[in-house]
Amino acid sequence: MPLNAFAPAAFVLGLIMGSFSTACVHRWLNGLTLIDPPRSFCPHCNTTLRWWHNVPLVSFVLLRGRCGHCGEGISWRYPALELLSGLWGLALAVVYGPGWPFVVLFVLGGLLLTASFIDLEAFLLPDVITLPGAVLALFASTFLLGPGSGPDAWLANGQTALWGAGLGGGGFWLLRLGYRALRGGEGLGLGDVKLMLLIGALTGPQGLPLTLLLAGITALLAALIHMARTGQGHQAPIPFGPFLSLACMVHLLWGPQIWQWWLHTVR
Ligand SMILES: [Zn+2]
């Protein structure tokens, strides 16, 4: 399939996955299952949504961010998740083209986005996403990916996926122990440790330094902005999962280019 047909198709596919992710986030936060109730509904008036109220992004714009039945505002997080998911599909299509890397990264990116938006809201990364995600990432990296020669040469493969998961998850587990010994209390959640199993299995050990650097810088910037805007001190909680996920996704798309840029700018 030529790229000028594949890329728009991947964008739409991403929007659809994003719509499913919003349902997962909303239902998880409200203690509902994915099958009951079977159709999407307005959380305010409980009206079952018509299909034209539930088209990713389009409905949000047409309804000006309100429920079509009761007029209650809909959180900006839902269309933001749909848009990010669509852009993820589009960017993957442009970088990798059709093939196993696209399929594997598309699905696991969807899991990272879903977990991140739950973390933003609940300060918690659900085991039901991170643990199966880590197993899936290990399986996919080992049996479906590389060692490639194109852009996918950058990804983990059968030789490196287990190392990446072990170093990522194990490293965070040690950090967590260290933080507890030095400062007391929870600096890093166990959820972040499990998330790093997933991320490490995708990036391999070679991708961990850049991913952690990007996550640290963006989380620090967000914390500073958050402190300036709310006037809260440095105790204001910031979930780390979304920054780890975003950094991992940026790395999977443009890791080699970022390294190149870094080497040329610094040296
Ligand atoms: Zn409503």
Image: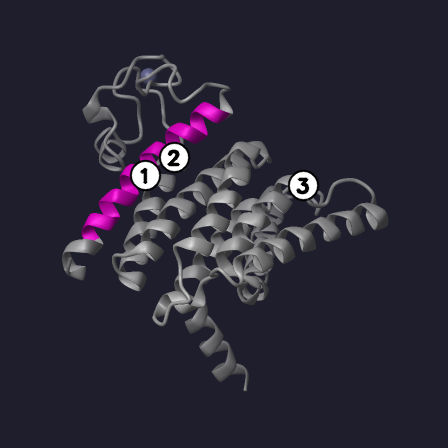
Q: How is the image coloured?
A: one colour
Foreground of the two, 73 or 80: 80
Question: In the visual, does 227 lie left or right of 108?
Answer: right
Query: Quarter of the picture for ligand 1?
Result: top left
Residue 188 within the magenta-colored segment of the rendering: no
Earlier-in-chain disc, 2 versus 3: 2
What separation in Å lies between label 1 and label 3 (alpha carbons)?
27 Å
Residue appearing at x 36%, y 14% in the figure = 37
What residue occupies the far bottom of the structure in this picture?
267
**Image coords of residue 105 (percent x, y):** 39, 52
Label 1, residues with CA under 10 Å away: few <14, some 14-19, many ≥20: many
13 or 79: nearer the eye? Answer: 13
Q: CA distance from mark 2 to mark 1?
A: 6 Å
Which quadrant of the figure has residue 190?
top right
Residue 17 image label: 1
Task: Give the residue drawn at x 28%, y 41%.
Answer: 15
Q: Residue flagged by tag 3: what amino acid is it?
A: Gly
* Residue placed under numbered mark 3 in the picture: 189
Magenta region, residue range: 8-28
Q: Position of residue 170 (x, y in %)?
A: 68, 52
Residue 63 % position (x, y): 24, 28
Say which residue appears at 55% left-offset and 57% top-offset: 218
Sequence order check: which comes first, mark 1 or mark 3?
1
Disc 2 + disc 1, Cβ < 8 Å = yes
Q: Is residue 228 left or right of residue 23?
A: right
Quarter of the image where the N terminus is located: bottom left
Main secondary structure found in the magenta portion: helix
Contact flag, marks 1 and 3 (Cβ < 8 Å): no
Please give the residue where the numbered disc 2 appears in the rendered image.
21
Task: Kindly identify the amino acid type of the residue bearing the numbered disc 1.
Answer: Met
